[in-house]
Every structure is written in structure tokens, then in C-alpha cells.
Amino acid sequence: MDELQLLHILENDPRTDIRDLADILNESEENIISKEKELEKDKVICGYHAVINWDKTNENVCEAIIEVSAKPEKGRGYDRIAETISQLEEVTDVYLMSGKNEFFVKVKDKTMRQVADFVGARLAPIDGVQATVTCFLLKKYKVDGVMMESGTDDDDRIQIS
């Protein structure tokens, strides 16, 4: 079975029907199910997610990207700090990165005030965190390869009132 092809298909559309996967990969449905379970067990497939445009709902959602400067610990590097940050409920993503700061942290809460309070009261005081820079997300154009909204109407005619 072409495992990489299976992964690419699932990455683009995790809702692809097992029968369709079997046809595309020229495998039995049982083999596909077995391979998916194996990949999940081995943490190659770590989840299946929907991309939600919260701006189209009645739910208040405020997201921010926070760059975190941190000091590595002897013998552990950044792992303990990353684990501590990752366990915070508001945190959706944590990445160790190269560049000016060590971590890229994405958080979600209901309001800018709640995100600001989270940073000041829960993120910044973590041992090893030296500084934070918070950038609030104002509008999403593309998320996980999915266009959120084109921003232009299909009808280019001038409106006359």
C-alpha cells in the first residue's frame, strides 16, 4: 500500500470514504482500515479536524499568535517549557522555531481582554519564559490550505441605488 498517498489524501480530506480510499489505492477496505489504525497508534495520524470559520457563527472567538522567548534548561532544553505551555487550555498550537524567539504559541479565547489576561497571568509567569510578544489575528484568509473567504463578490457589476 502506498502509505504516503493515503496520508496525502487524508490530509486533504479526512472524511474521504473508506470505499473511495480502497478504489484510489487499489486496496481492500480492510487493509485501509487496518493501515489507518496502525498510523493512528504510531502517532503518524494525530487527529482529524474541521476548519471552522468562526466569523460566520454567533460565537465570540479571539485568536492570537504569541512569540515566546525562553531560556533552555540544562539537560532538557526547551521540552519542559513546551510541555507546560501545551497543557494550558487556551493554547491550540506550540512550535519550537528558529529566529528571534524560541516558541510560536497560538491561543484561543472569547475576547482580546481574556487573551491578554491569559498571557499576563498564566503564560508569562512560567519558569523559563523570559518575554512574550502577542499579535492578535484580525482576519483569516487561508487556514490549513483552505480559503476562508475570497473577499470579492463574483458579481463585478456596479451597484446602483
Image (spheres, rainbow, N blue to C red):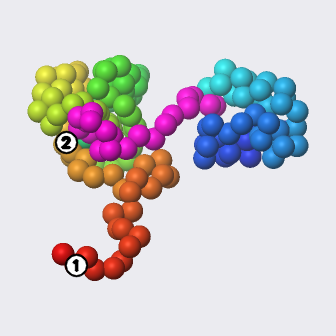
**Which quadrant of the structure image shows residue 95?**
top left
Q: Which residue is mark 1?
A: 160
**Which quadrant of the structure image shows residue 9?**
top right
Q: Amino acid at mark 1?
A: Ile
- How packed is label 1: few (under 14 Cα within 10 Å), some, or many (20 or more)? few
Residue 59: x and y in percent read 27, 33
Mark 2 or 1, nearer chain start? 2
Residue 1: x and y in percent read 84, 39
Foreground: 124 or 114? 114
Answer left or right for 154 relative to 54: right
Give the extent of the magenta segment: 44-63
Predominant secondary structure, magenta span = loop
- How packed is label 2: few (under 14 Cα within 10 Å), some, or many (20 or more)? some
Is residue 72 magenta-colored? no
Residue 82: x and y in percent read 36, 27
Which residue corresponds to the image point at 71% horizontal and 23% vertical from the top-left?
37
Which residue corresponds to the image point at 24% horizontal and 30% vertical from the top-left?
109
Q: Secondary structure at mark 1?
A: loop
Residues at marks 2 and 1, CA–CA distance in whole angstroms = 43 Å
Answer left or right for 125 relative to 44: left
Q: Amino acid at mark 2?
A: Thr
Foreground: 26 or 99? 26
Which residue corresponds to the image point at 41% horizontal and 70% vertical from the top-left?
154
Q: Which residue is mark 2?
A: 134
Which residue corresponds to the image point at 77% horizontal and 41% vertical from the top-left?
20
Would residue 66 be visible to someone looking at this image? no
Closer to viewer: mark 2 or mark 1:
1
